[in-house]
Amino acid sequence: MKQIYLDHAATTPVDKEVFMAMRPYFDQDYGNPSEPHWWGQEARKAIDEAREKVANFLGAKTQEIIFTSCATESINLAHKGLIEAIRETQDAKRKSSAPHIITSSVEHKAVLETCRHLEKMGMAQVTYLPVDKDGLVKVEDVEKSIKPETVLVSIMYVNNEVGTIEPIREIGETISQINKLRMENGELKIYFHTDATQAIQYLDCQVAKLGVDLLSLSGHKFYAPKGVGALYFKKGTPMVRQQDGGGQEYRLRAGTENVPYIVGLGKAIEGVRSQGSGVRGQVEKLKDKLIKGILKIPKVKLVGDSKKNAPHIATFLVDGVEGEAMLLLLSEKGIAASSGSACTSGLLEPSHVLTAMGYRPEQAHGSLRFSLGQGTNDEEIDCVIKVLPEIIQRLRKMAPKL
C-alpha cells in the first residue's frame, strides 16, 4: 500500500543531508562544547556555525540566537523570562499593576498556556484578542488593547491549524510607532514576539522586516529532528533565564548543548534559505489542486482564505462526519492527515482555533487538515481526491439519523 504523508504541519521527516551533517557528532566529534580540549572545541565550532546559519536566515546577530529544545521552550523563555525581568526592574509605583500581555485567541497552546500560567501566578494580566472569520487578528484591535502596563504583544506568524498568515509586519510597525512616543515619555517599552514555527519553510522571516523583538521556531517543522528549536531575542531585550545551572547559551539556557541536533537545525535552515521560492510555488500549486478536488464533495467547506493563507496548509469542515473517524479511514488507505493541531488532537474538546473563528463545536469536530511538504507530488494529491469522497460517503451513511 502506498504511503501518503500529508501531515507536515505536525512534523516533517529528517532530511538526508541534515542527518548526514548530524552523524559525526554522535560518535566522532562527541566532545562537550564547554571543554577546552580538541574534542570540546570541535563541538563548540559546530554550534557556532549552526548559530551563524540561523542568524543569517533571520537577519540577526549570532549573539541574539538561543538554542532550545523546541518552540514551546522558546516561547516559555520569551514570555516568562521577559515578564520576570520587567517585574524585577519595575519601580515601586509600577509594581502596583501587573505587566500586561496582548495575544490572540488562536495562538498555539504553548503561548496560551504560558500566558494563563503567568495570570494564575499573578505575574501578568492578559488580553486575548478575537479574530475574524478567516482567523485574522485586526491591527486596530492590537492598538486599542494597549495600555500603560502593556509590555508584550505575542501574535503567531502562521496559524498551525488553518494556515492563516497574520499581519505581523503591520503589527510590528504599529508597535514601533507607539514605542517612539512611550520612550519619549519615559514609559515602558512594548516588546513584540511571534511564533514563526509554521512560517520558516515558506515565508520571509527577516526579523527587521517583521519588526519583532522575539521569534520562536522548532526544527522538526522544516526537516530537522524533533528536540531542537531556537529563540531570537533582540539585543537589549530584558530576559531572565528559566533553566538554572551553567553559563551556556549566553547564560540564558543552562545545560550541555545538544550538539548533533543543533547542527541539524543549522543545516536544515540553511537548506530552507537556499531553496528559494521554487518549493513554495510547487507546494502551493498542489494545495490549490487538492482544494479544488475536495470542494467538489457536497457539504464540505474550506476554512479561511486559500489565496492569503500559508501555501502548505488546507483545512476543511466536513458536515455530518467526525474528524477522528475520517483520519482512521484515511490511515487505513495509507494517508496521513490531521484533525486540528497535533498538540490538541486526542482531546475531546473542539479546536479552540475554529471556535474562535466562529464555528460551532459540532462543525469544529468535523475538521480535516492536510499539510503538504516538499516531497508531495501530483499522484498523491490525485489519490486523496479519489479516496476521500468514498470515505465521507461511507461515514455519512453510518451516522445516526436525527
Image (cartoon, rainbow, N blue to C red):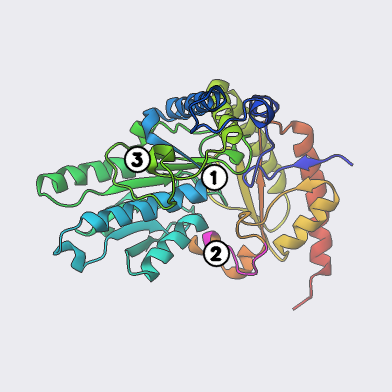
- Residue at image position (59%, 40%) is 221
The answer to which of 52 and 301 lies nearer the viewer is 52
Q: Position of residue 263 (x, y in %)?
A: 57, 29
- Residue 378 appears in the rendering: yes
The kind of residue on which mark 1 rests is: Ser
Mark 2–mark 1 distance (CA, rounded to whole Å):
34 Å
What is the crowding at mark 2: few (fewer than 14 residues within 10 Å), some, or many (at least 20)? some
* Circle 1 residue: 69
Q: Secondary structure at mark 1?
A: loop
- Residue 277 appears in the rendering: no
Q: Nearer the viewer, mark 1 or mark 3?
A: 1
- Residue at image position (43%, 44%) is 246
Image quarter (top left, top right, bottom left or bottom right) of the N terminus = top right
Q: Position of residue 208 (x, y in %)?
A: 34, 32
- The dominant secondary structure in magenta is loop
The residue stretch that appears in magenta: 346-353
* Circle 3 residue: 212
* Circle 2 residue: 359
| Res 391 quadrant in image | bottom right
The kind of residue on which mark 3 rests is: Val
Q: Nearer the viewer, mark 2 or mark 1?
A: 1
Image position of 56 with respect to 138: above or below? above
Of labels 3 and 2, earlier in sequence is 3
Q: Secondary structure at mark 3?
A: loop
Q: Residue furthest front?
A: 37
